[in-house]
Amino acid sequence: MLIPITLVFVALLALLQIPMTITVGLKRVHTGIRFMDGGDPDLMQRMRAHGNFTETVPITLLAMGGAELVGTPASLVWAGGLILLGGRLIHYTTIRSVGWGNGRAIGMSMTFLALAGFAICILVAIIRNLI
């Protein structure tokens, strides 16, 4: 069984991660800092924005794929994917532009909403099959 909606978001989020990774590498080349952040606040912001993306997106995409596989309505899968995508963009742009603003919390909340929503969809489907 294919999971076409999830695969759309896998592709979009994978493409978003490329420039995030590049900005960290370019800053390292520019500053000569090869490991950690060297006390450079801009490098730290870039690293945390990229790191948080890397920490949260894979598990959410796995949950999204699981939700799609168990038959969650397409509209819910699309909605969750858009919430995840929006949350990651808000989180990243907030960290990169102002650091630790409200957008960071909003972006994380949106990410957790998508993650929890997909997990609940999976559990509901499993429970329905057991009853």
Image (spheres, rainbow, N blue to C red):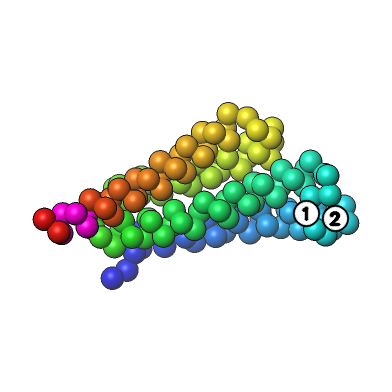
Residue 124 point in image, percent of width and height:
23, 51
When the figure is inspected, residue 109 is found, relative to residue 115, above or below; the finding is above
State left or right for residue 125 relative to residue 34. left
State left or right for residue 40 relative to residue 64. right
Per the image, label 2 sits on a secondary structure element best described as loop
| Mark 2 in CB contact with mark 1 (< 8 angstroms) | yes
Q: Amino acid at mark 2?
A: Ile
Residue 57: in magenta span: no
Dominant SS in magenta = helix
Q: Which residues are magenta?
A: 125-129
**Mark 2 vs mark 1, CA separation in Å:** 7 Å
Which of the 4 image quadrants contains residue 114? top left
Q: Amino acid at mark 1?
A: Met
Task: Check disc 2 and report the residue beneath it.
Answer: 33
- The residue shown at (65%, 39%) is 95
Per the image, label 1 sits on a secondary structure element best described as loop
Task: Check disc 1 and report the residue beneath it.
Answer: 36
Residue 33 point in image, percent of width and height:
85, 55
When the figure is inspected, residue 84 is found, relative to residue 18, above or below; the finding is above
Residue 60 point in image, percent of width and height:
44, 53
Label 2, residues with CA under 10 Å away: few <14, some 14-19, many ≥20: some
- The residue shown at (37%, 45%) is 116
Q: Is residue 25 visible?
A: yes
